[in-house]
Amino acid sequence: MKLRISDGEQETIVPASIETVEQAFAAGVAVRIGTEITATDGRRWLAALALEPPVPRAGEEPLQFLLSGGTRGHAVVTGRLGRSEVLRRFRAFIDEVEPAASG
């Protein structure tokens, strides 16, 4: 499984694991608007696109993502999700593909 991070200027591809996903979505990591973070195992994929921050609302995380995922020929797109929810979904995606990765 691979994790691809592209911020419009630089693209990085590394082996996907719980640890690399946690690093990519860590609260202290600056994420540029338009950055795309994608995990794929060749058959399935999950991608998060960093969105322009919305007007702040109580209880919402300031950085939000548009999440999409699917398999060959099928895709699903969500609305805005906060960093912690996107991280939870990426962890679950990796656990489904590589249960031993969660350790």
Image (cartoon, rainbow, N blue to C red):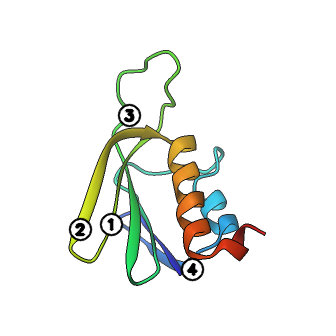
Q: Which residue is under mark 2? A: 74
What's the residue at 34%, 54% (across, down)?
A: 34
What's the residue at 64%, 44% (across, down)?
A: 27
For the residues marked 4 and 1, what is the alpha-carbon distance in whole angstroms? 20 Å
> Residue 14's mark?
4
- Vertical relation: 79 (above or below) 13: above
- Of residues 100 and 10, the one drawn nearer to the viewer in this rendering: 100
| Residue at the extreme right of the image, as rendered | 103
Is the Cβ of the residue at disc 2 closer than 8 Å to that at disc 1? yes
Q: Which residue is under mark 1? A: 70
Q: At label 3, which amino acid type do we have?
A: Pro
Q: At label 1, which amino acid type do we have?
A: Gly
For the residues marked 2 and 1, what is the alpha-carbon distance in whole angstroms? 5 Å
Q: At label 2, which amino acid type do we have?
A: His
What's the residue at 40%, 84% (across, down)?
A: 42
Q: Which residue is under mark 3? A: 53
Q: Earlier in the sequence, mark 3 or mark 2?
A: 3
List x then y, in percent, for residue 67: 37, 52
